[in-house]
């Protein structure tokens, strides 16, 4: 089983709609969680960290469910520019601080 | 205030040649990570280095691949006797020294290696 798993998609989303997707992680000792965004053939960039209480940044909301070992990302009022691959990232101190990436969820926002 | 710098951006090698990929971390960062991304796939961890030390190389293939991060100069990922399956994008990331757990890593623009 992969340490971090994501639905690869694509999620086809009408402009203005809401889309949400999850990421599951297998190691209960995971301590830090992030969502990164990667545009086609570009480097990943941090979208947001995920805090235990959940957090929101504009149209983006991230949630953490430790009991079920998943994190989620919700995008409201989708824009065409939100089309990208969203990477779930997990960090464990015992793993030496290395970031472990999921395979990514592809989102396509269409007019 | 340059970000993570990788060079070259594109590298073409014939089968059997050596590839050297360079990564200069952000100023003040002493942790470097190398990831490989095959076409249409996610990022796969290769190696984690601090200055002059390899901390975790659990993702490195056993043969032909090596990495270093000397006291002076960039981190180098070296691939000897390249094969077509080595064709991929190689990303380097850096994070600050003694970073708390929730500090992000910053990525370079990657080196796209093509083996012909």
Image (tube, helix red, strand yellow):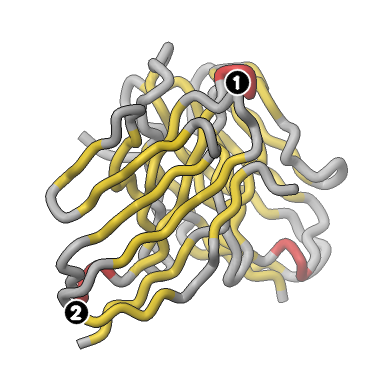
Decide if residue B72 is on the left or right side of residue B44: left
Report the residue that reaches farthest toward the top.
Answer: B98
Residue B104: percent from left, percent from top: 36, 32
Residue placed most toward the observer, B44 or A111: A111
What residue lies at 60% left-to-right and 52% top-to-bottom?
A: A5
What residue lies at 25% left-to-right and 60% top-to-bottom?
A: A75
Q: Which mark is first along the chain, 1 or 2?
A: 2
- Chain of the residue under the numbered disc 1 shown in the image: A
Residue B105: percent from left, percent from top: 40, 34
Residue A73: percent from left, percent from top: 34, 52
- Chain of the residue under the numbered disc 2 shown in the image: A
**Disc 2 and disc 1 in contact, CB within 8 angstroms:** no
Residue placed most toward the observer, B54 or A81: A81
Q: Badge 2, how many Cα within 10 Å: few under 14, some, many 20+?
A: some
Q: Which residue is mark 2?
A: A15
**Res A38 → quadrant:** bottom left
Name the element at disc 1: loop
Name the element at disc 2: loop
Q: Badge 1, how many Cα within 10 Å: few under 14, some, many 20+?
A: few
What residue lies at 43% left-to-right and 20% top-to-bottom?
A: B101
Residue placed most toward the observer, B109 or A87: A87
Q: Which residue is mark 1?
A: A96
Task: Give the CA separation, mark 2 to mark 1.
Answer: 40 Å
Q: Work out whether A103 lies above or below A19.
A: above
Report the residue that reaches farthest toward the front.
Answer: A67
Q: Work out whether B109 lies above or below B22.
A: below
Residue A14: percent from left, percent from top: 24, 82
Closer mark to the observer between disc 2 and disc 1: 2
Q: Which mark is residue A87?
A: none
Residue placed most toward the observer, B63 or A88: A88
């Amino acid at each position: 089983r992969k340490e971090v798993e994501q639905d690869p998609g694509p999620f086809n989303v009408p402009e203005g709609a809401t889309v949400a997707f999850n990421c599951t992680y297998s190691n209960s000792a995971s301590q830090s969680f992030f969502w990164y965004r990667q545009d086609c053939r570009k480097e990943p960039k941090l979208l947001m960290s995920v805090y235990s209480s959940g957090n929101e940044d504009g149209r983006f909301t991230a949630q953490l469910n430790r009991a079920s070992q998943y994190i989620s990302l919700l995008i409201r009022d989708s824009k065409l520019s939100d089309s990208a691959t969203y990477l779930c990232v997990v960090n464990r101190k015992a793993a030496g601080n290395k970031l472990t990436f999921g395979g990514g969820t592809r989102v396509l926002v269409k007019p | 205030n340059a970000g993570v710098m990788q060079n070259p951006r594109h590298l073409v090698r014939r089968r059997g040649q050596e590839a050297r990929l360079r990564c200069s971390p952000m100023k003040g960062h002493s942790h470097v990570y190398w990831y490989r991304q095959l076409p249409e796939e996610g990022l796969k961890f290769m190696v984690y280095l601090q200055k002059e030390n390899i901390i975790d190389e659990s993702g490195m293939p056993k043969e032909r691949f090596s990495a270093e991060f000397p006291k002076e100069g960039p981190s180098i990922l070296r691939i000897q006797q390249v094969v077509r399956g080595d064709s991929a994008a190689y990303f380097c990331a850096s994070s600050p020294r003694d970073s708390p757990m929730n500090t992000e890593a910053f990525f370079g623009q990657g080196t796209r290696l093509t083996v012909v």
